[in-house]
Image (cartoon, grey):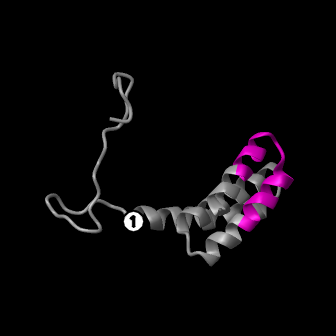
Amino acid sequence: MAAALNWQGETVHACGDAAQAIRDHSPALELATETDNAPALASAHGGLARAHHLRGQLDRTRRQAALALNLFETLVREVQPSPEGTRGPTSCTRRPVPTTTTRHWPP
């Protein structure tokens, strides 16, 4: 549900409606907090930062952007690939980066 509210907030932001974007991202932030959904929480903070920026509220923009960046950096650190040849809950499978010569994406 939080992800859906974040998508809705991004959509109305793209249409220039910062007030509605804030109204969508705010409950997404609450839901993500209640459900301990870190990706949705980071997205909600990022969406709020963009919406506040659109309204010219730079202090709020900086605060929300810093929270989003901190959460996204934490998420990235948590999913770093394991050393070569190991398996387990922390290992990642790397997919090729799409290029202009890639004919079928995703593989």
State whether residue 102 is above or below residue 10. Answer: above
Is residue 53 in the magenta section? no
- Identify the image quadrant of residue 31: bottom right
Q: Residue at x 39, y 65 (%)?
A: 77
Quadrant of the snapshot with the N terminus: bottom right
Q: Residue at x 82, y 58 (%)?
A: 57
Q: Which residues are magenta?
A: 8-27
State the residue position of label 1: 77
Asked if one can make out residue 54 in the rendered structure from this viewpoint, the answer is yes
Instruction: Decide if residue 39 is on the left or right side of residue 87.
Output: right
Which SS type dominates the magenta stretch?
helix
The percent position of residue 83, horizontal first and vertical second, equals 19, 62
The percent position of residue 22, horizontal first and vertical second, equals 79, 59
Q: Residue at x 16, y 64 (%)?
A: 86
Q: Secondary structure at mark 1?
A: helix
Q: Residue furthest bottom?
A: 34
State whether residue 50 is above or below residue 64. Answer: above
Q: Residue at x 86, y 54 (%)?
A: 19
The 10 Å Cα crowd at callout 1, few under 14, some 14 to 19, many 20 or more, is few
Is residue 21 in the magenta section? yes
Q: Which of 42 and 104 lies nearest the eye of the viewer?
A: 104
